[in-house]
Amino acid sequence: MYKDTNCGEPRDTSVGEQITVAGWVNRRRDHGNLIFIDLRDRSGLLQIVFNPEYGETAHDLAQSLRSEWVVQVTGKVVARLPGAENPELPTGAVELSVTDLVILNRSITPPFEVSDDVEVDANTRLKYRFMDLRRPRMQEILKLRHKVTHIMWDHLTEEGFTQVETPILIKSTPEGARDYVVPSRVHPGDFYALPQSPQQLKQLLMVSGVERYFQIARCFRDEDLRADRQPEHTQLDFEMSFVHQDDVMKVVEDLYTRIVKEAAPDTTANGPFVRLTYAEAMERFGTDKPDLRFGMELTTITETAATSDARVFQAVASSGGSIRGFVAPGCGSYGRRQTDDLTEFAKSSGAQGLVFIALDESAPSIDALEDEHIKSPLKKFLSLDVIKKMATEMGAAPGDLMLIVAGTDKLVNTVLANLRNEMAKRLDMLDPKRLIFSWVYDFPLFDWDEELQKYEPAHHVFSSPKAEHMEYLDTDPGKVIGTLWDLVCNGSEMGSGSIRIHDKDLQTKLFNIIGYTEDQISDRFGQLLTAFTYGAPPHGGMGLGLDRFVAMLAGEEAIREVIAFPKTQSAFDPLFEAPSRIEDQQLEDLHIRVVMPKS
RNA sequence: GGUCCCGUGGUGUAGCGGCCUAACACGCCUCCCUGUCAAGGAGGAGAUCGGCAGUUCGAAUCUGCUCGGGAUCGCCA
């Protein structure tokens, strides 16, 4: 070993010890005859002192040291001079008085300072990711991520799960996201696809009798990137046989509670997890992934609003749409600028407009509202009675701002859900250290696709319809609720699971409903359906996004921050400069000819 | 594919039509300095302003296109 002690370890109890440490020069303070070095390794910082009286050669050598050089130093741990302690550092009571210095490697001037305090351009960070990852914050995130996956392995192993690796080279399944494909050399013209998830494979493992499978699985999707989307992401994928919905949920609830407690002790999670049906979530929050850290729940006021003289309300109500809204507490004093902002925000979510009613805080009560207490662009169309009634229904009080959107159900929900989150942000109601988990369950199995005029799977095609809804499969598939649920936390979907279909005929029926031909079914799902005919156990499971979870525990917005070597928004890796051209010989071996796009 | 924001020495920013042969901080180089910890002091090097085209007597500053980064809608779980 090059070292017998880590930089972050020495304490005042270590005084007098002879130690050897090795690491990177974090910073150098050269006083001429006295040189201080902050030496950094994975454990932290240690102040090294070069004093010619204790090591003349070492001191001479130390004059050449620069940032990020790699050195090995031997010396004695000494207490710092009284008054020279540094309470900022865990090792701040002591320092290493050096007798020997070995320069293990030098560094050219770094592209940016290795420190949490500097903000560096994303491209530069990724190009020098190996430097970026030296920053303490990034080291901390790498360790956090490891801790999370370690607990997953431990916990699931304790619960009787077996980890099984599934292939990365598998078959393209054109529905869902676009596949990444890999050409085959031995089968000219054929391609593998990288898995979007190991869904079919884990179900096959259930047929194989594994009963409890898990994998921390890489999943690939060739779609446009976002702050929370990378071309490859990692899922905790697991599947269980002979279980019901609650059994699967319990595994996750126990696991995630434990992870938050052990891996992110400064963060709190609720327990038990909140349970909401899909219908209830949509009704109360307008979204299937509500942020439950704050209230501002939605209210439907279609009937009341329709009795007003406002033509927008009348038109929407008579055409079967809805009028809904929520109350932003204490925002009744918002000025023109702020309400304009909100209207603009609503429009960017697709709304035609935003109706707001500001109630002045000087009003003694809702019943005692007078004309002068009300500010609203629709004021002249809304009688005092209608406003009072709306305020009562929505639970508004003097001093509040009522935000109302009218339109089709879907649009109203989308706009209000976004607006609700926006208001929470503005009102500073979002504490990232507070995690509120919820189960949103009883999702419909199918969505009606207006454009294609056909049913689409709401989540995925393998989820089992509720037993009591089987009859609707033939009569009205849109009404079928699946044994299908999401794990939601602070407004983000953390994962999704279901009890799967394990019957060939039922699975085939579902494929038919979403319009797959016999050929498509056998081509894409033949292996699964065949397996089902050999005694498939009832089973269910989940896929949970690891990157997003770790980002949340770390308090990061972008999953890029919690992936060691991520890609840019154009799916480019600036470090390796991937993707890249390949040799003509490689193309030839793969039977591939490249046709560049025109223009 | 759409919309929006950003692109100035190594890093982060200022400058937003002539005062810019570009300013500041950090970093880098040289020298001084035995108690600093974002050390200090003195001096120095380093960018033609992402690229191209245009407007103008004159562009880092205006316009168009383009490239790159980021946010977001579509897409995607």
Image: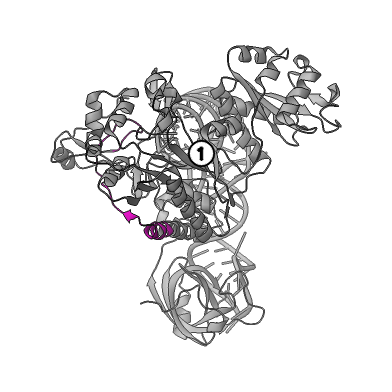
Q: Amino acid at mark 1?
A: Val
Q: Quadrant of the N terminus of chain A?
A: bottom left
A81 sits left or right of B8 in the view:
right
State which chain disc 1 sits on. A
Circle count = 1
Residue A30 in magenta stretch: no
Q: Please, is residue A314 above or below residue A268 in the view?
A: above
Residue at left offset 69%, top offset 40%: A427
Residue A35 on image: x %, y %: 53, 76
Residue at left offset 27%, top offset 49%: A209
Q: Please, is residue A233 above or below residue B5 in the view?
A: below
Magenta region's main secondary structure?
loop
Front residue of this view, candidates A249 and A197: A249
Residue B22 on image: x %, y %: 58, 46
A523 sits left or right of A368 in the view:
left
Q: Please, is residue A23 above or below residue A33 in the view?
A: above
Question: Which residue is under mark 1?
Answer: A440
Residue at left offset 61%, top offset 37%: A421
A205 sits left or right of A451 in the view:
left
Residue A157 in magenta stretch: yes
Please tell me in which quadrant of the rendered image residue A331 appears.
top right
Identify the magenta region: A151-180
Residue A527 on image: x %, y %: 22, 37
Q: Secondary structure at mark 1?
A: strand
Residue A115 visible within the image: no
A283 sits left or right of A399 in the view:
left
